[in-house]
Image (cartoon, grey):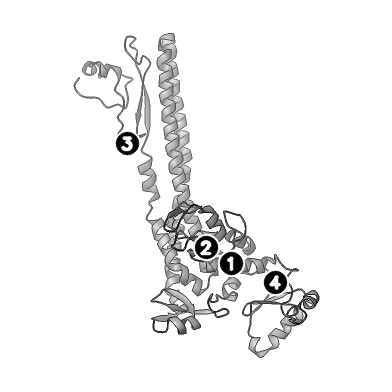
Amino acid sequence: MSVVKELDDMTECCICNEMFTDPRILPCVHTFCLNCLMSYGKDKQPGDDMPCPLCRKEFIIPADGLSGMQKNFFMEKLVSARKLSAGEEAGHIICDVCSSDEVRPSEATAQAKPATKHCLQCQQNYCDHCSQSHTKVKATASHVMIEIGKELQKKEIALRLPTTCETHKGEEIKVFCLECQLAVCVMCFIKSHKTHDCSDIAEVSIDRHKQMKNDTDKIRELLEKTEGVLPRFEKEQNDLANHLADIENEINTAADKLIAAVERDRVKLLSEVESIKLKRVKQLETVRQKVEQHLAALESLKQYSETLLSSGTACDVTRSANSLHSRAKELMMFDVISHVDSSLPSLNVSFTSLTLLDVENLVGTVAKEGLYPGILCRQCVLCKLGLWLSHRATCIFHINTNHPQTP
């Protein structure tokens, strides 16, 4: 997958299907536009539980509302990279220097040349002439200039797009406060964190990177394991349909022999089989949806973590490590195999053919096992009549039922 295509997928909000604007990240690591979240939760109040629009995992709305949800700084960086890489506005971006004439702004804008370069440090756009001048000035000679519209590589996105402080514009984040668990710039450190235990963010990111790498490897293994479970549902449903089709054939064969006398019983038995089928299919669909949701959560976390590991700065990794680790631990606690096994007990359905014309259920009974835990199979008619002791040695049709040993 190309970097542009990957950026397109990563930076598209699944609610509005547009590129993120003011992206906010939820505890489940899914990201949405702030306006989309506010529209989705318009009936919710601070302190309410609200489900994630994608995976349905609930989170508590902050005291200051959905606008208080954590910003996804890494996603904002990816959005900027997408705009620069794809050159969506190329040809419409004018040089910031040429158009900066404060005395005659309209005339300067009209004469401004199209921008071809973007300075990551200054966050300004330059035409070819101004970009050359910019790189010749001693104070800005070391600045990184990228070509607008040129596709960036993952390493370039990580290395070239610095993370700057929201409070102190232009100040790059280089310090991590261990006490507050915040990534800050030098000015923030001087003003608010000087007495705290702080460290170089690059050093802190080493351990966080190892932790995320370990979690991502485990999630990748769990993802493969979960994907392997999905084919089981189709096989189970096909086997169920085939087996119940055989049961229906047995019922029809027995009913045809008894002609009109067994018509009522035949309809009732087919109804029972259909009921079993519908209940079982409903069970399969319910558990399938749960596993698919879990699979989607694993895939989403894996993709986000891998992109963060390959494209994120030390600051990005450090900021996201704890929440990603918590989400990974939560997903790994879900044993998909045990969940499927416990939610889908084995199902055995058999047909008991009886030939007595003077009792109920002339055609027979449908015995079901495993559809729902704790439900016993129906006893045959002879057992109901108290004839089990003399009947059990001769009944060749009665299968898979539990009988009392005495009438």
At mark 4, the secondary structure is loop
Instruction: Give percent across and percent down for residue 349.
Output: 38, 28
> Residue at label 2?
24
Q: Earlier in the sequence, mark 4 or mark 3?
A: 4
Question: Label 1 sits on what residue type?
Answer: Leu
At mark 1, the secondary structure is helix
Question: Label 3 sits on what residue type?
Answer: Pro
Q: Is residue 155 left or right of residue 389?
A: right
Question: CB atoms at circles 4 and 1 under 8 Å apart?
Answer: no
Q: How many marks?
A: 4
Instruction: Give percent across and percent down for residue 102.
Output: 73, 81
Q: Earlier in the sequence, mark 2 or mark 1?
A: 2
Nearer to us in this view, 243 or 200? 200
Above/below status of 79 relative to 202: above
Q: CA distance from mark 3 to mark 2?
A: 43 Å
Question: CB atoms at circles 3 and 2 under 8 Å apart?
Answer: no
> Which quadrant is the C terminus positioned in?
top left
> Residue at label 1?
78
Question: CB atoms at circles 2 and 4 under 8 Å apart?
Answer: no
> Residue at label 4?
148
Task: Give the image quarter of residue 121.
Answer: bottom right
Q: Earlier in the sequence, mark 3 or mark 2?
A: 2
Nearer to us in this view, 94 or 3? 94
* Camera-nearest label, 4 or 3: 4
Q: CA distance from mark 3 to mark 1?
A: 50 Å
Question: Label 4 sits on what residue type?
Answer: Ile
| Label 3: how many Cα within 10 Å (few below 14, some 14–19, many 20+) | few
Above/below status of 329 relative to 101: above
> Residue at label 3?
373
Q: CA distance from mark 2 to mark 4?
A: 27 Å
| Label 2: how many Cα within 10 Å (few below 14, some 14–19, many 20+) | many
Q: CA distance from mark 4 to mark 3?
A: 64 Å
